[in-house]
Structure formats: C-alpha cells, structure tokens
Image (cartoon, rainbow, N blue to C red):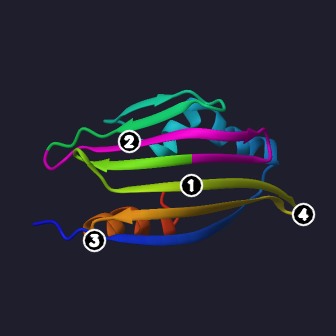
Amino acid sequence: MIDRSVTHATFTLERLYPATAARVFAAWADPRTKARWFSTPDADHERDFRVGGREANRSRPDSGPSLTFESWYRDIVPDERIVCTSVPHVGRELAAASLTTVEFCPADEGTRLVLTEQGTFLDGPRSSARWSTGRRAGQGLR
C-alpha cells in the first residue's frame, strides 16, 4: 500500500560560471548541449525550446520502472531567465509537480545562475527523496 502524502519544498541553487550570460543561457537553450548534461545516452529526449513548448526525457532502464520528466516552457527571456513547469513520473505514477525559475545574472567573475524550484512532492519518501534530494544537490548543474 502506498503512503499517500504531499510534501511542499522550495529551494534555491546558485552557481557562478566564468562565462557570459549569453554562453550560460545557451547551455540551456541549445538542444544538443542541454541533452549532454540533462539526459542520459539511453534516454529518449525531445525538446521544443520556446514559450509554450514542451521538453520530455524518458529513461528506459533495464530493470525497475521507467522515469519520465516533462516540462513546459512558460517564459523565456534570452540571456536573462527561463521559467518552466514540470512533472516527473515513476512508471505511470505522478511523483511531483514543480515551478522552476532559472536566472542568468551578470557578475564580475562571469554569470551567476540562480535556480529556484517550488515543488509539490507526492506520496511519501519514495517520491520526495528521489526528486527533491537530487534537485537540491544540484544534480545536472555542473
């Protein structure tokens, strides 16, 4: 029996990159570049990077349930910000829903990236541990 619950979490990650805001933004905007750090070689990755566009990443593991991560772009201001809403699924079960804002802020040393995620993590530790812990640790933000 699944322990039905809802956990809300908001967290912010900051990274300083020794590059211009345009170059850091491009790592999110260019499909090939983002696929290198966001996806895995064995996953199906689709991307339509525009306001109203959708991104989907589906893993095909040898064992265990598939993992699907879908996002819809709500706001894109080149070299300044990206806002998207996302839903990850474990198998057919919805694991979470989130609003993510990525800001690209010029800094003396380059660009300060600020990612803020507001999430609703569903159904106990199985979901919240898998999604929020990795996201808070900056998984994928090198």
Which quadrant is the C terminus positioned in? bottom right
Element carrying mark 2: loop
Identify residue for label 2: 40
Task: Assess disc 4: are there few (<14), some (14-19) or many (≥20) residues with their C-alpha within 10 Å of its C-alpha.
Answer: few
Q: Is residue 42 left or right of residue 1?
A: right
Q: Which residue is mark 4?
A: 108
**Residue that extends furthest to the left in the rendered view of this protein:** 1
Q: In this figure, which residue is indicated by the disc labeled 1?
A: 99
- Left or right, 108 with respect to 48, comes to right
Residue 103 placement: quadrant:
bottom right
Which of these two is toward me, 12 or 27? 12
Mark 4 / mark 2, whichever is N-terminal: 2
Measure how far apart labels 3 and 2 are at the Cα level.
Answer: 26 Å
- Residue at 24% over, 38% down: 60
Callout 1, which amino acid? Leu
Q: In terms of sequence position, does the residue under pointer 3 or pointer 2 come before the other?
A: 2
Per the rendering, the mark at residue 124 is 3
Q: Calculate the distance from the C-alpha at mark 4 to the C-alpha at mark 3.
A: 42 Å
Separation of marks 4 and 2 at Cα, in angstroms? 33 Å
Q: Position of residue 56 (x, y in %)?
A: 43, 35
Pointer 3 local density, CA inside 10 Å: few below 14, some 14–19, many at least 20: some
Q: Secondary structure at mark 3?
A: helix
